Amino acid sequence: MNIVLLGAPGSGKGTQAARISEIYGIPHISTGDIFTENIKNQTSVGMLAKSYIDKGQLVPDEVTVRIVEERLSREDCAKGYLLDGFPRTIPQAEALDKVASIDAAVNLDIPLEKLMRRLTGRRGCPKCGGNFHIDFIGDVTGCPKCGEKLVTRADDNEETVSSRLKAYTEQTTPLIGYYESQGKLRTVQADGAIEDVLRSVLEVLKAL
């Protein structure tokens, strides 16, 4: 089964992707990971991507597609794969359709206001590495594990989160319509507990 996983920052996409990958025995392919791999191994396409990244430029779609296509050609993808972080735009989706056959695009849907709270409410411990959320720890400022003062990630402030969500809405939301027009879109409400969301995802995949 070849799956594209859609979801805004904070929707739980990474968590669900790991579980789906494990249950179906298919690789979880994150474009961030394969970019890093190609650059680390100094492949020709990796070095090409790096030349844009080093200049602070966006990597062109054709380069990104080449990297994804190479990854999908590997033996571990023979029985399927789960794409996370690609495609991000309609042109990328169109390019993907030329080199791969997608069975379903699963969209993890959650109201933007809930995403804002999820992301701005995260707290981390610089000492033990623990991660927490104000929904569970309330106004506690010390790490429940070691007592160190909790901190908020620099990119979890409201201004940055708003910018990330806006970019997602403008760039990636059109993909929902794209896959819906192909009859491949499956939308799952993702504002519940992790296990409940996973159960809903598995139900829509079993129905394919």
Image (tube, helix red, strand yellow):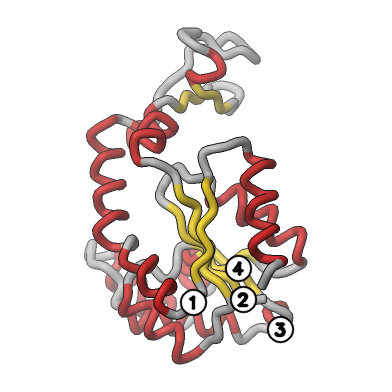
- Could you tell which of marks 1 and 4 lies nearer the N-terminus? 4
Is there any visible trace of residue 33 in the rendered image?
no
Q: Which residue is mark 3?
A: 78
The label nearer to you, 1 versus 4, is 1
Q: Earlier in the sequence, mark 2 or mark 3?
A: 2
For the point 33% across and 61% down, the residue is 173
Label 2: state its secondary structure. Answer: strand
Asked if residue 159 lies left or right of residue 196, the reply is: left
Neighbor class of circle 4 (other Cα within 10 Å; few <14, some 14-19, many 20+) is many
Residue at x-position 43% and y-position 76%: 46
Mark 2–mark 3 Cα distance, whole angstroms, equals 10 Å
In the visual, does 29 lie left or right of 207? Answer: left
Q: The disc labelled 3 sits on which kind of residue?
A: Ala
Spatial separation of the CA atoms under disc 1 and disc 4: 18 Å
Give the Cα separation between the discs numbered 3 and 1: 23 Å
Closer to viewer: mark 3 or mark 1: 1
* Mark found first going from the N terminus, 1 or 2: 2
The kind of residue tagged 2 is: Asn
Please tell me which of labels 2 and 4 falls first in the chain: 2
Residue at the (55%, 24%) spot, across then down:
132
Q: How far apart, in angstroms, are the residues tagged by discs 2 and 4?
A: 6 Å
Amino acid found under the numbered disc labelled 4: Leu
Q: Which residue is mark 2?
A: 2
Please name the residue that numbered disc 4 is placed on: 82
Pointers 3 and 1 in contact (CB under 8 A)?
Answer: no
Precedes in sequence: disc 3 or disc 1: 3
Residue 123 lies, in percent from the top left, at 47, 24
